[in-house]
Amino acid sequence: MATPASSADGAPSGPSARGAWGPDGLSPEHRDEIVAGLREQVGTLTTRVVGAMEDRHRWFRSLGAEDRSWITIVARAGIDNFLAWFVDAGRAADPGTLFNAAPRSLTRKISLHQTVDLVRTTVNVVAERVGGLVPPQDRPVLELSIVHFSREVAFATAEVYARAAELRGGWDERMEALIVDAIVRAETDDLVVSRASALGWNTRGPVCVIAGPRPDEPDLDELRAAAAGRGLAALASEQGG
């Protein structure tokens, strides 16, 4: 039976699946040992991340208990995701899956900038603590892996928010059309008011309704921007064929 080729230091140089040595020179068995020790500390690391979020970010302290609990889950998912990636040197990083732990509505309550704060704080806390959790000879490889993975998370974060904005844009347009349709039909009720509030309509002043023929090249975004530039809130939609 053929055996894999070996380098001078004994590390296999031939390709294999799970048994491949990583580019950093760590064997699969060594990776397993490192990750096994770190998995025992995931709960402690998550607690420290949440504590750091409370200390460093005022916006986190102002969140409700439910939203804070979701952020805690995302932070833990991030640590678990990193360990799963690190232990398998041949697997491509897919940090976007860590956001599957939280509901899509979280992107409405927490901005992209705040999510970056979460990622940065999680990375910093793990990097600060990892020195005392692994032998000195393993620290450089692990720290470099954390930096690499955090960069992938940053890209994934931007993609999640871009996708959420796209979906939210479509949802907002449908909601806006329903509101305008109800007004045109004189069927307004508390549900219409609730839908308008969901779109950010919070004016309590006089309301003006304007209806007219559809222009050849309608630009509802320009209409809304023009209204906003004058300090007005506007809901607009095309009705009919």
Image: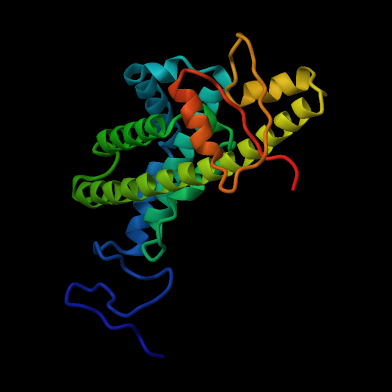
| Rendered image quadrant of residue 185 | top right
Of residues 174 and 78, the one nearer the viewer is 174
Residue 141's spot in the image, x, y percent?
Answer: 23, 52
Residue 58's spot in the image, x, y percent?
Answer: 37, 16
Q: In the rendered picture of this protein, how many numbered marks are placed on residues?
A: 0
Point 51% across, 41% down: residue: 165
Residue farthest along the left direction in this orientation: 8
Of residues 177 and 118, the one nearer the viewer is 177
Of residues 160 and 86, the one nearer the viewer is 160
Q: Quadrant of the N terminus?
A: bottom left
Q: Does residue 186 appear left or right of residue 27 in this picture?
A: right
Point 61% across, 28% down: residue: 235
Point 43% across, 37% down: residue: 42
| Rendered image quadrant of residue 112 | top left
In this rendering, the answer to whether 172 lies above or below 6 is above
Residue 176's spot in the image, x, y percent?
Answer: 66, 33
Residue farthest along the top direction in this orientation: 205
User: Which scheme is used to colour this image of the protein?
Assistant: rainbow
Residue farthest along the bottom direction in this orientation: 1
Residue 216's spot in the image, x, y percent?
Answer: 59, 48
Q: Does residue 80 appear left or right of residue 168 in this picture?
A: left
Point 47% across, 49% down: residue: 96
| Rendered image quadrant of residue 192 | top right
